[in-house]
Image (cartoon, rainbow, N blue to C red):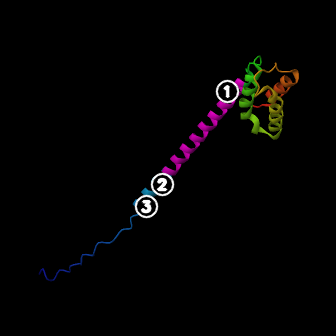
Amino acid sequence: MNPDDIKIRDIKPLLEVPDHSLYFFIGVIIVSLLVLAGVFYLAFKWMKTKNRLNLRRNTYKKLLHVDLSDSKKAAYEITRYGLVFKDDSPRNEEMYFNLIARLERYKYKKDVGPFEYEERSYLELYKGMIDV
């Protein structure tokens, strides 16, 4: 057999194989980052809500334990602590402004008398309306 008689098959050129693994990898990274960002967002939102509720609970405790013997100081404290719960409902807002209007005569004066029964009853009613 002569080497020239052997049929030689041509070597075919290299074929390009479509490779999408880079795109899949980038897609997995993007989806993972989105999920991670969502988890961080939900954790941040939960912590913010948790702190807000603690603030409301602590303010409510302070409002419950306002010393009414010093009416001037108590009027200022009730005004400050009651403001946190004013926006809970329109009824709370109306009650808050009504209470503040009644406490005005105990503020901005050098000497004031003790709280009257009416102011104490309005304060107790406002405390009862608050949901913590």
Up/down of 10 relative to 45, above or below: below
Q: Give amino acid for label 2.
A: Ile
Q: Quadrant of residue 7?
A: bottom left
Q: Which residue is mark 2?
A: 30
Up/down of 101 relative to 26, above or below: above
Q: Which residue is mark 3?
A: 23
Crowding at dot 3, Cα within 10 Å, few <14 / some 14-19 / many 20+, comes out as: few
Which residue shows up at 48% across the image and 54% down it?
Answer: 30
Viewer-nearest of labels 1 and 2?
Answer: 1
Q: Quadrant of residue 45?
A: top right
Q: Secondary structure at mark 2?
A: helix
N-terminal of the pair, mark 1 or mark 2, is 2
Up/down of 82 relative to 27, above or below: above
N-terminal of the pair, mark 2 or mark 3, is 3
Q: Quadrant of residue 130?
A: top right
Q: In the rendered image, which quarter contains the N terminus?
A: bottom left
Magenta span has 34? Answer: yes
Up/down of 131 relative to 35, above or below: above
Q: Give amino acid for label 3.
A: Tyr
Q: Tell me if I can see residue 132 in this picture.
A: no
- Give residue 79's position: percent from left, percent from top: 74, 30
- Start-end of magenta stretch: 33-62
Which residue shows up at 77% across the image and 27% down it?
Answer: 107
N-terminal of the pair, mark 1 or mark 3, is 3
Q: Nearer the viewer, residue 94 or 128?
A: 94
